[in-house]
Amino acid sequence: MTKPTEARGKLGILTPGMGAVATTTYAGVFAARRGTAAPVGALSELGRLDLGNGKKPLIKDILPLAGLQDLVFGTWDPYGHDAFEAAVEANVLSAKDLLPLEEEMRSIKPMKAVIDRNWVKRLEGSGNVKVTKSKWDAAQTLIEDIQRFKAENSCDRLVMIWTASTEAYKEPGAVHQSVTDFEKGLKEDNAEISPSQIYAYAALKERVPFINGTPSVTIDNPAFHELAMEYGVPLAGKDFKTGQTLLKTILGPGLKARMLGLSGWFSTNILGNRDGEVLEDPESFKSKEISKKQVLESILESDLYPELYKDAYHKVRINYYPPRGDDKEAWDNIDIFGWMNYPMQIKVDFLCKDSILAAPLVLDLTRFMDLAHRAGARGLPQRRLHARA
């Protein structure tokens, strides 16, 4: 990579999926612009870098990040509501926070979405869905949408971040082994190509960085790495990990830092938003389950510390519970052992707002991804690519 160019002009943030996460992100950015709400949780706004000698400037003061005032939002969604109506439906934010933002929120209207119920069985559209002859045609219409959005909003640069539902888990197949194979599959309407992959393909063809905000295996394959390298575009993302997995990324390193052993980690969630409903489907849940388990495994490195973590039992459950809405509750029972193998336990009851934790990550990821693109980053990190090989 090279020194990044300056962040001149507007940055368009495209969010396939305009549910709770996307609308909460829009509202938070609009409120921060007005100075009516602090962007709590956003590293790109509140984080500082330690340069030594007592100097700890804000990250945004030393890195050329796109300014909040330069962000423009666009979206696709199978439900035709504008962003204000979608935010009301999501029921994350209160009326006192949403009403002052109504004009800006209503200006965001979703483009017709590409969906396939074979990949998200519990998601129903409401007429705002593209009707195309093949997945190739669907990709071309998305490319046209991207071009039109960029022109109509006078954007200098774009970033796409997947904020739609988790798709069914399917390992990459023959159609994902090269760009040629993938494009042939699009034209033949190959069933192994998911909607998120059609969006990612359209983004890369337009030299737009793509971020995956779910545990779906959207970009974890040779075809997308090849395409991203060809067009000079970075790829990133493997779930926002904002709830229970957030605690795993906090507690897991703490256990390893103290060389404490782990016998078992049982996790269960109750969640009542659209994400919770989608994850009721076993195939979609499998994507989430694998992602959650991989996080803990990558932190604890059982191959290096077999006496501490090799035999650890890890169980994950997600339960759809409509009364809870976006207020997720996660229960963890963690069995650990210490000196002379004496057992101990940690029990956690984490009550969180899923989208409140995810929204600042959308802001951070898109701004840093834009920065990486301007610095010449391209393709998937090699670790991710090799992990899927």
Image: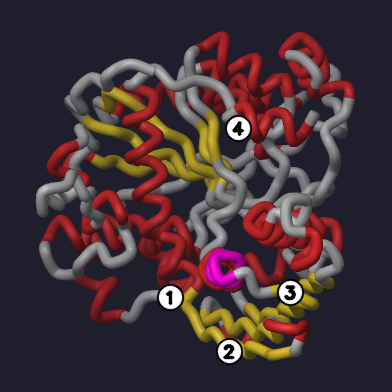
- Residue 276 % position (x, y): 67, 71
The image quadrant that residue 140 belongs to is top right
Name the amino acid, label 4: Tyr
Residue 297 higher or lower than 201, as above or below: below
Measured Cα–Cα span from mark 2 to mark 1: 20 Å
Q: CA distance from mark 1 to mark 3?
A: 36 Å
Residue type of the residue flagged with mark 2: Asp
- Viewer-nearest of labels 4 and 2? 2
SS label for mark 2: strand
Residue that appears at 80% across and 65% down = 307
Residue type of the residue flagged with mark 3: Leu
**Does 198 appear in magenta?**
no
Whether residue 121 is visible, yes or no, is: no
Q: Main secondary structure of the magenta part?
A: helix
Q: Nearer the viewer, residue 47 or 126?
A: 47
Q: Name the secondary structure under disc 3.
A: strand
Q: Earlier in the sequence, mark 4 or mark 3?
A: 4
Residue underneath mark 1: 92
Q: Earlier in the sequence, mark 2 or mark 3?
A: 3
- Residue under circle 3? 262
The quadrant of the rendering that contains the N terminus is top left
Estimate the spatial distance between the alpha carbons at disc 4 and disc 2, rounded to whole Å. Answer: 37 Å
Q: Which residue is mark 2?
A: 349
Give the residues drawn in magenta, as a range.
253-258
* Nearest to N terminus: mark 1 or mark 3: 1
Q: Quadrant of residue 336?
A: bottom right
For mark 2, does the 10 Å Cα neighbourhood hold few (<14), some (14 to 19), or many (20 or more) residues? few
Q: Residues within 10 Å of mark 3 (few under 14, many from 20)?
A: many
Which percent across, then down, holds residue 131?
69, 34
Q: Which mark is residue 199?
A: 4
For the residues labelled 1 and 4, the Cα–Cα distance comes to 26 Å
